[in-house]
Amino acid sequence: MKALVTGIAGFVGSHMAEYLLDKNVEVVGTIRNRSRMDHIIDIQHKVKLVECELRDPFSVESLIAEERPDLIFHLAAQSFVPTSWNSPVDTIHNNVAGQLNIFEAVRRLQLPARIQIACSSEEYGHVEPHETPITEDNPLRPLSPYAVSKAAQDYLGYQYYKSYGLHVIRTRTFNHTGPRRGEQFVTSNFAKQIAEIEKGLRPPVVSVGNLQAKRDFTDVRDVVNAYWLALHHAEPGEAYNIASGSCITIQELLDRLLALSTVSIEVVQDPSRMRPSDVEILLGDASRFQHQTGWKPTISFDQTLADLLQYWRER
Ligand code: GDD
């Protein structure tokens, strides 16, 4: 069995590749010429890396024609919400055109590939208090260009299934973190600041943005297991929440990370970290996915945070 992982050098892509190698699956992964390779340094000799610009239809079609994967994990994306405020056109183009090029290549080549697409809880956006925990039937009220790009990917997944019968599974994943999480995302950002303070590399002050937001976190290692199960047991064309089913405020997250540290640290709010509109609460109901696939998260959030802080201490 052969799997294509787009964005293999990224946070989720590198964990996905390790998971697949453990299952003895042949792995092909896309990189770009500017991709950093540090996340896949240990596995790069076990996978096939192909330089492919997903925005370029010719590049994508020749890759898929050559490799003819059985499974496609489409994880490459511009995934940081604040970047989407600064570069909305680039975010939409990157995320939507990249996925369309994969769908079109699979359709034209008439490949029986099963495709998982990385949709997001951000698509739900504004959520009314009575609407939690959020099910897949909740309205999508996206609050950022990133969220709109993910809603477009999600609907295109539905449409390509309905119009052409493509085997697409739309995973709407809530927040996820763990070792290798990019340093701009909140869990890694705080953990990295704390690790640098412990090493004496910065004054004992952590800069933060909005601490009132609530998020539902799952460990990335549980998320890649969910993506595997999605392509083996989920219904094509369907959307599924991937979530832990509980949420915490970003304040609580910060307090839990600070409690793992031995040094005394001050917290200051940095206005540049505030967003034009922030999603207030994301709390997911993953029961549809759990019933369909038997998935459940296995790594506690305390363990995830300890592993993440350790990751930054070792860098
Ligand atoms: N990044 C960041 N940095 N976020 C902060 C900070 C800070 O210093 N302080 C507070 N926050 C708040 C943000 O305002 C947001 O409410 C929350 O922490 C989480 O921010 P991020 O880690 O940047 O993630 P996100 O929730 O915007 O989006 C993530 O989850 C989505 C799924 O819900 C990303 O991983 C997306 O790619 C993913 O789709």
Image (spheres, helix red, strand yellow):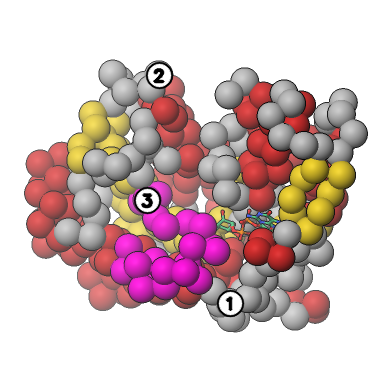
Q: Quadrant of residue 87?
A: bottom left
Amino acid at pointer 1 = Leu
Amino acid at pointer 2 = Asp
Q: Is mark 2 within 8 Å of ligand 1?
A: no
State left or right for residue 201 relative to residue 141: right
* Helix, strand or loop at mark 1: loop
Q: Which residue was labeled with disc 3?
A: 76
Which mark is first along the chain, 1 or 3? 3
* Helix, strand or loop at mark 3: loop
Above or below — where is 271 with respect to 178? below
312 in magenta? no
Main SS type for the magenta part?
A: helix
Badge 2 density bin: few <14, some 14–19, many ≥20, Cα 10 Å:
few
- Find the distance from the CA under tag 3 to the CA under tag 1: 21 Å
Query: Magenta span covers which residues?
Result: 74-94
Amino acid at pointer 3 = Ala
Image quarter where ligand 1 lies: bottom right
* Helix, strand or loop at mark 2: loop
Residue 43 pos. (x, y %): 37, 21
Q: Quadrant of residue 309?
A: top right
- Find the distance from the CA under tag 2 to the CA under tag 3: 20 Å
The quarter of the rendered structure image containing the N terminus is top left
Residue 161 pos. (x, y %): 32, 68
State left or right for residue 96 relative to residue 283: left
The quarter of the rendered structure image containing the C terminus is top right
State left or right for residue 56 relative to residue 218: left
Q: Which residue was labeled with disc 1?
A: 143
